[in-house]
């Protein structure tokens, strides 16, 4: 992953024509950019895992009884392209924002979720409920 602060540069570098397989050491860079551009650095870094998920590309989990990691984002191990990966990570970060900052009991696809659509569009991403 090139050393850059621009999400558009990263997306252009990876292109839209090849499959992207995320690695744990690459995710913090994208997470930091999204946190800065969309969430004004209001999110702490949650526990992020990568694994094969049936029927989803990403999950946000909240466990109030956990001793170490209350918030967890799980990402699928293969995406169509880098942009899809960034959109899914951003999607799960919106759910995280709903729970952490807005203190909603359930981080669902509601009005507050879709309020982020303009911010995503501004940086060249799509925010939607279902991908693929």
Image: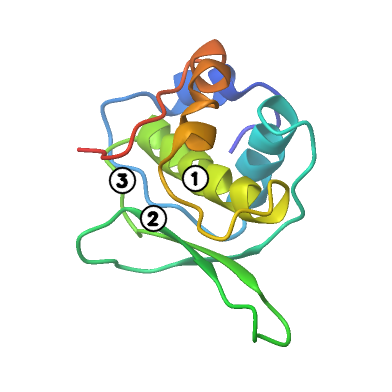
* Residue in view at x 64 percent, y 44 percent: 31
Q: Are marks 2 and 1 in contact (CB under 8 Å)?
A: yes
Q: Alpha-carbon distance for marks 2 and 1?
A: 7 Å
Q: Which mark is residue 89?
A: 1
First-in-chain label (3 vs 2): 2
The vertical placement of 123 against 16, above or below, is above
Q: Alpha-carbon distance for marks 3 and 2?
A: 10 Å
Q: Is residue 32 left or right of residue 56?
A: right
Q: Alpha-carbon distance for marks 3 and 1?
A: 11 Å
Front residue of 125/119: it is 119
The C terminus: image quadrant: top left
- Look at mark 3 in the image and give the residue it sits on: 79
| Mark 1 neighbour density, 10 Å: few (under 14) some (14–19) many (20 or more) | many
The vertical placement of 98 against 38, above or below, is below
Please state the horizontal and vertical placement of residue 131, each as a whole percent of the image. Answer: 26, 38
Indicate the secondary structure of the residue bearing disc 1.
helix
First-in-chain label (2 vs 1): 2
The N terminus: image quadrant: top right
Q: Which mark is residue 58?
A: 2
Indicate the secondary structure of the residue bearing disc 3.
loop
């Amino acid at each position: 992953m090139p050393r850059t602060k621009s999400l558009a540069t990263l997306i252009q570098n990876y292109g839209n024509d090849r499959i992207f397989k995320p690695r744990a050491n690459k995710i913090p860079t994208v997470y930091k950019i999204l946190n800065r551009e969309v969430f004004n650095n209001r999110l702490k870094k949650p526990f992020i895992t990568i694994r094969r998920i049936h029927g989803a590309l990403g999950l946000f989990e909240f466990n109030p009884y956990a001793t170490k990691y209350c918030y967890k984002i799980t990402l699928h191990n293969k995406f169509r392209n880098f942009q899809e990966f960034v959109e899914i990570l951003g999607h799960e970060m919106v759910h995280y924002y709903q729970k952490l900052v807005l203190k909603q009991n359930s981080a669902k696809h509601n009005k507050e979720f879709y309020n982020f659509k303009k911010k995503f569009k501004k940086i060249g991403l799509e925010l939607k409920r279902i991908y693929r």
